[in-house]
Amino acid sequence: MTRLSGATPSGRAQLGNYLGAIRRWAAEGTADDLYFVSDLHAMTTAYNPQRLRALTREMLAVLIGAGIRPASVFVQSDIMRDLTALTWVLECTSTFGEVARMIQFKEKSAGAKTVRLGLLTYPVLMAADILLQGADEVPVGEDQSQHVELARALARRFNTTFGDVFVVPDLVVPQVAARVRDLADPSRKMAKSSRDDAGVVFVLDSPDLVRRKFRRAVTDTANRVEYRPDEQPGVANLLEILGACTGRSPAEAAAGITTYSALKDQAADAVIEELSGIRKRTLDLLDDPAELDRIRATGAAHAAERGSHRLEAALRVAGLG
Ligand code: AQP
């Protein structure tokens, strides 16, 4: 069984990416699973090319530093020729209407002065990511479930029209280990591309910086350390983070803590401890570009090899070559 997931280098990996996804990929992933850095997806809105390249390498190093098997990790653009070939075939399998009704496209394009065509069509590229690798399961958040439904519809339509080539993947909405919120504004989820990063803890932040960000975390004036997400979202977020890092429920994590400053210190200590291994391994890898290149090339070769027979079959039955 192959599970496939990606992380987009739209910014630096943050605590929410780690606690909500990457940590689980490392702990639960099997040798058949694939995790990729979706750099092509980061091009659908304005970006800086040098920064994209650097963020892609950093995200790759973070995935390896987190303990995911190197052979299970690849960078999307490293198999770009195969992916874009399949994307074209799948674009000619999709209709304008089904792509244009994607909620994420509507949300991200609303009010924008210019909208890149890639923002409209990237769910088809995502379908190619999934179908090229023959993924059986695609764990995604609610916001991406419509895109996986599109991949399922395209796989079924292609198989029925041209011949049985693709695995129809299952959509899996994982039990969220932690929905980490921005420390400075707990009404928002922590996000790597936040305009203001005062409340965003990045995986590679130094321990001092992590501590400072927690000390400045927004709480409230109730002065009660209890797990009440609706009434006390800031405090609840700190308890969720502390619980996620120490293997306890947020309510259990609250036991014995009486002040907000103690809560912030304990949450900061737990995060620093939780991130120390991945931070060190990631920084070591970034300091050894030859090793990172070697790992990257191995992952790309593995992904290309896995997908090549499916691409060939799809092109053949679609009347190409
Ligand atoms: N705050 C979060 N809490 C829990 N899980 C989170 N994830 C992201 N933020 C949180 C999970 O991280 C995985 C990789 O995310 P992604 O790169 O595919 O895109 P995203 O969800 O859009 O991540 P960001 O950090 O919020 O990026 P931007 O700022 O570009 O939108 C996913 O499994 C995601 O659920």
Image (cartoon, rainbow, N blue to C red):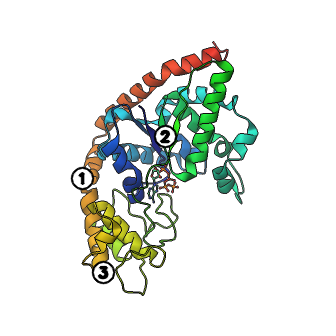
- Disc on res. 138: 2
> Is residue 164 visible to us here?
yes
Which three-letter amino acid code belongs to the residue tagged 2? Val
Give the quarter of the figure containing the N terminus. top left
Quick one: label 3, few (<14), some, or many (20+) residues within 10 Å? some
* Vertical comparison of 104 with 268: above or below: above
- Mark 3 or mark 2: name the one nearer the start of the chain: 2
Q: Residue at x 48, y 60 (%)?
A: 191
Q: Whole-percent x and y of residue 252?
A: 29, 70
* Vertical comparison of 221 with 29: above or below: below
Q: Residue at x 44, y 24 (%)?
A: 306
Q: Whole-percent x and y of residue 75?
A: 44, 37
Label 3 and label 1: CA atoms lie apart by: 26 Å
Left or right of 273, for residue 72: right
Q: Are marks 2 and 1 in contact (CB under 8 Å)?
A: no
Give the residue at the far right of this rendering.
Answer: 97
Which three-letter amino acid code belongs to the residue tagged 3? Ser
Label 3 and label 2: CA atoms lie apart by: 40 Å
Q: Quadrant of residue 95?
A: top right
Front-most of 138 and 127? 138
Query: Which residue position is annotated with label 3?
Result: 261
Q: Residue at x 54, y 46 (%)?
A: 42
Which three-letter amino acid code belongs to the residue tagged 1? Gly
Q: Residue at x 41, y 79 (%)?
A: 219
Give the quarter of the figure containing the C terminus. top right
Query: Which residue position is annotated with label 1?
Result: 277
Q: Whole-percent x and y of residue 91?
A: 67, 32
- Mark 2 or mark 1: name the one nearer the start of the chain: 2
Q: Whole-percent x and y of residue 30?
A: 34, 35
Quick one: label 2, few (<14), some, or many (20+) residues within 10 Å? many
